[in-house]
Amino acid sequence: MLITNKIEVPQPLEAVWEFFGDIPQVAACLPGANLTEEVGPDHYAGDVLIKAGPVKLEFAGAALIKERDEANKRIIVDASGADKKGRGNAALALQAGLKPIAKGTQVDISLDLALSGAAAQYGRGLVADVTAVLLQEFSTNMTSRLDAKAKGLDPDKVGAAKPASGISIALRAARMALARVFRRFFLPYQPQPTGR
């Protein structure tokens, strides 16, 4: 499942690129993620815990930086993990590209997410909505951490991500799902051209 998003942060390109060079710092922006060990150059191990309503998934896994393109300000990270209770696996290919904009830096994020086992049974829509909510929280936390660094403060104390809270994520994901259903059933039907 491919999920894309754009994040705008009010920091200069070089500061954001430097931030993306510290993968544990980047992971700390994602609620529920915690990289606990550097197992090699650009290779990290850790955990991800996501709770959304009755869904609770806890993965142990690793993240590996596959490519750092200094010239084009692009980074590619592969991550994979297994649910600690043996209910499934997740694999993620993340690509982030940075470009300067008038208000700071735009981060174009592309996530290619593959789930198997129990994790996959929740459906593409729910997973996409939960991921979108987590990306919004990631954006907020990243901006807080970058602001803290710019002010000479400890980003771990200022912009620490909260655990991935079930109620908050579930409510926001449900709101997104309802909006999708509303658009599908209540917006006027627009016939597609037949090509004749």
Image (cartoon, rainbow, N blue to C red):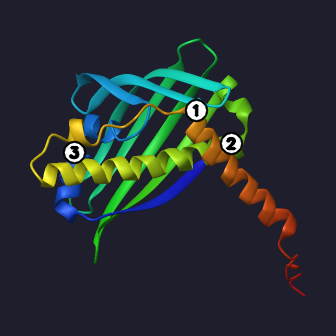
Q: Secondary structure at mark 2?
A: helix
Spatial CA span between label 2 and label 3 = 31 Å
Spatial CA span between label 3 and label 1 = 30 Å
Q: Which residue is mark 2?
A: 126
> Up-down: is 11 above or below 59?
below
> Up-down: is 119 above or below 154?
above
Pair 2/3: label in front: 2
Q: Which residue is mark 3?
A: 21
Q: Please indicate, yes or no, whether residue 116 appears anywhere in the rendered image.
A: yes
Pair 1/2: label in front: 1
Q: Amino acid at mark 1?
A: Gly
**Occupied quadrant, residue 14:** bottom left
Q: Earlier in the sequence, mark 2 or mark 3?
A: 3
Q: Amino acid at mark 3?
A: Gly
Q: Please indicate, yes or no, whether residue 117 appears anywhere in the rendered image.
A: no
Residue at image point 28% right, 73% down? 103
> Up-down: is 125 above or below 37?
below
Q: Classify 10 Å Cα crowding around label 3: few (below 14), some (14-19), many (20 and above).
A: some
| Residue 141 x %, y % | 34, 47
Indicate the quadrant containing the C terminus: top left, top right, bottom left or bottom right: bottom right
| Residue 4 x %, y % | 52, 56
Q: Which residue is mark 1?
A: 166
Q: Earlier in the sequence, mark 1 or mark 2?
A: 2
Between 47 and 157, which is closer to the camera in this rendering?
Answer: 157
Residue at image point 57% right, 24% down? 57
Residue at image point 34% right, 37% down? 27
Pair 3/1: label in front: 1
Q: Is residue 16 left or right of residue 170?
A: left
**Occupied quadrant, residue 186:** bottom right
Q: Classify 10 Å Cα crowding around label 2: few (below 14), some (14-19), many (20 and above).
A: some
Between 1 and 84, which is closer to the camera in this rendering?
Answer: 84
